[in-house]
Image: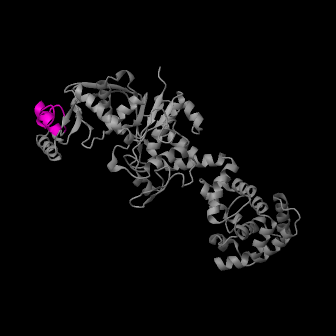
Amino acid sequence: MDRKVRVRFAPSPTGPLHIGGVRTALFNYLFAKKHGGDFILRIEDTDQKRFVEGAEAYINESLEWLGISPDEGVVQGGDYAPYRQSERMSMYKQYADQLIEAGHAYYAFDTSEELDEMRKKLEAARMSAKYDATSRMNMKNSLSLSQDEVNKRLANGDPYVIRIKLPRKEEVRFHDEVRGWVVVHTSQMDDKVLLKQDGLPTYHLANVVDDHIMQITHVIRGEEWLPSAPLHVLLYRYFGWEDSMPKFAHLSLLLKPDGKGKLSKRDGDRLGFPVFPLEWKDPKTNEISSGYREGGYLPDAVINMLALLGWHPSDNQEMFTLTELVEAFSLEKVSKSGAKFDADKAKWFNNKYLQSMDNQALADIVRPMMAEKGWESENDYLVDVVTMVKEKVNFAPEILNVSEYFFVDPTSYDEKAVKKKWKGETPETILSLAEVFSSMDQFAADDIQAKFSAFAEAKGVSPGSIMQPLRLSVSGMAGGPPIFDMLALLGKEVVVSRMQAANGRIISTV
């Protein structure tokens, strides 16, 4: 390609960004970076009735968190600003007027009641209820009315929309980078509104004009826009922009984990997983929807998971850095079929990334969570705790759930383990072992294990019969990291103190 690759992600700020929209943004980003191009974020906010306060900021924050930052956009600026369609309104009418002058569009003065009546008549005649080359001549528009009547209506300020004038019998053909050749006959289409009564453009007009002006080379978007693509192809032709028309690629949907249909928020609520990248609070209802970030997912894991939903690399590789994804990505490997969302696989990815994560970096994530609980810790100690327990968890917040005893004395004890292992002689045994530990000069894991083994041998009991009561007395839990490593990290003073207090605490809490 002679032109520099330029792609855009163009969401509408009508609510939180769906994870399917995130995947669309990701594929645009990967394609742009693979070809040394630009990734643009354009906010398509022409539908002011559905505008939701805070949605635009949410979109920007989501992309930043995921590391797929735009090269141009409302925040970043760029040579083609403004990147918010509501700030570009003054120019769209001139393009609609250009189409009218060329005979490719027309004024339509029909009221909503007249449109309803048309649909009823067509349905009664078992015909397709659409405003098209057949029905338009029976309606009130600049094709069916005299020029004098049209001029009079315009001079009087009668409400109107501008509709595209589709040819009666024509095949519209274009090549989709994912789906191959697409052929649609204009008899299956209708004369879509390009400019609404309030002067605002519809998506069809605004996105074509903006894509042309911003020199977009590839339009990579969801398959819900595939039925509109033939209309957009015609608009490029009517404007005389065919030579610079972008290539199209329509991505398949993200599907429900079970059943059929598009993945929805309801599915997430029903099955217990997020469908939004960040937590979202509805400004009207105050309803809070969970997010991947707040759920403890790592952004790299979310990116890796999404990339493999509908895109298949050449080999069986599953783990990719963002750089590796850029290198491997191609539209040729994008599937035509919908991809079922797998919440368990999402957890698997997060676990893999968490386990491979630098322990200091993971500690930095956990530290603010500790602060919320009022816990304090030296950095080196926290890093050691994270290192010891992270293999037991899938998400960073879970680290504190399984490591609470490293920061505060246990306030409860595993009831089943207590009933099974805390026998009549157990308190005395634990107190005796505490005395042994108290006398130790070195409290490293190997030293603790040696003293423990010698103690068990001297008592004539198996080490296993003492080990779980020891763990219970110190942590309150039945399981955890290697016990002697755990004790060494806690330190002699804490360990001995908890062992000495264990019996009274267990009796009072169980």
Residue 192 figure quarter: top left
The quarter of the rendered structure image containing the C terminus is bottom right
Q: Position of residue 423 (x, y in %)?
A: 71, 76
Asked which colour scheme the image uses, the reply is one colour
Farthest residue, direction front: 155
Toward the viewer: 46 or 370?
A: 46
Left or right of residue 276, residue 160 in this image: left
Count the marks: how many?
0
Q: Position of residue 436 (x, y in %)?
A: 85, 70
The image shows residue 249 at horizontal and vertical percentages of: 41, 31
Residue 135 covered by magenta stretch? yes
Q: Nearer the viewer, residue 296 or 82?
A: 82
Seen in the picture, residue 452 relative to 206 is either above or below; the reply is below
Whether residue 312 is in magenta: the answer is no
Where's residue 183, x and y in %?
30, 27
Q: Is residue 17 left or right of residue 113?
A: right
Residue 314 in view here: no
Is residue 471 positioned above or below 98 on the image?
A: below
Does 313 sit above or below residue 431?
above
Residue at 55% in and 31% down: 328
What residue do we see at 19% from left, 35% from top?
Answer: 107
Is residue 237 positioned above or below 434 on the image? above
Residue 346 seen in render? yes
Bounds of the magenta segment: 130-155
- The residue at 52%/50% (across/down) is 344
In front of the other: 283 or 134: 283
Q: Quadrant of residue 282?
A: bottom left
- Residue 286 lies left or right of residue 354; in this view the side is left
